[in-house]
Amino acid sequence: MQLADLSHRNCVEAGHGFINFLAKFAYRGLLNNPVKTVRDTLINQCAQILACYRKNCASPSSAGQLILPECMKLLPVYLNCVLKSDVLQPGSEVTTDDRAYIRQLVTTMDVAETNVFFYPRLLPLTKVDVNSDSLPTAIRNSEERLSKGDIYLLENGLNIFLWVGVNVQQGLIQNLFGVSSFSQIGSSLCSLPILDNPFSKKVRSIIDMFQAQRSRYMKLMIVKQEDKLDLLFKHFLVEDKSMNGGASYVDFLCHMHKEIRQLLS
């Protein structure tokens, strides 16, 4: 392995470890503090870390430029994911029991589990190579990355969603679902039909692999674009603004930049 590859891997692992720490620190803090206090503490501490780096370690640059250390480039996106989680983000659709369950669940997760829980894995399935054991490259969790002509698999360690765009080719629908049109796909399916074609076998093998990797059984949900489950699916596109007011990644990055500049002024 090249030194550059090793350095990148170490930085990614550092980011994954940091989201595990942030989540557990925040969720345990809720036992003795209001939600707003916990949220403000997270933002302030992370802003102080980045401001300290900017002041003492970074090369001189324009005050309007956001400077992040290599090992913490993922910190803002991960912090925003934690802040937007059902435990820290107010919303009447999440019950007190659900919040308590998620809080307890996260405090027992390891680094890999918290990483995929807060930033789900999203794969474009029409890009899959049916003759290879490799997976398609994961894409960023944002609706603007989705194509109406594609099929995506999203998993977060608790759920698996198969999202189908309204313009997916008829041949792909036939190969995967055994029906001839988008309208005939059953939203109540909890497993894919066993069909004898390479695309069906590959997608089913990916789903089986994901389920085998997790300690909890993940139910498969079929999501047709613009169907009623589409809103639930979009809840997991964590780089976008959430329905209950959670900031998009771009907006949060701007907010963090403002916090850092205030600390340095």
Image (cartoon, grey):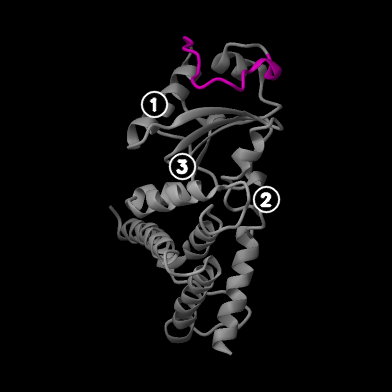
Q: Where is residue 62, by image quadrant?
A: bottom right
Mark carried by residue 243: 2
Q: Where is residue 3, by image quadrant?
A: bottom left
| Local SS, label 2 | loop
Mark carried by residue 156: 3
Q: Rounded to the nearest whole Å, what is the CA distance between mark 1 and mark 3?
A: 14 Å
| Local SS, label 1 | helix
User: In terms of sequence position, does the residue under pointer 1 or pointer 3 come before the other?
Assistant: 3
Q: Residues within 10 Å of mark 2 (few under 14, many from 20)?
A: few
Identify the residue at image location x=38%, y=51%. Answer: 104
Q: What span is in magenta? A: 181-196
Q: Please, which residue is most extreme toward the left here?
A: 1
For residue 244, say whether it is visible: yes
Label 1 amino acid? Asp
Q: Residues within 10 Å of mark 3 (few under 14, many from 20)?
A: many
Whether residue 183 is situated above or below residue 40 in the rendered picture: above
Identify the residue at image location x=41%, y=51%. Answer: 115
Task: Give x and y (percent) for residue 217.
Answer: 38, 31
Q: 12 and 96: which one is in front?
A: 96
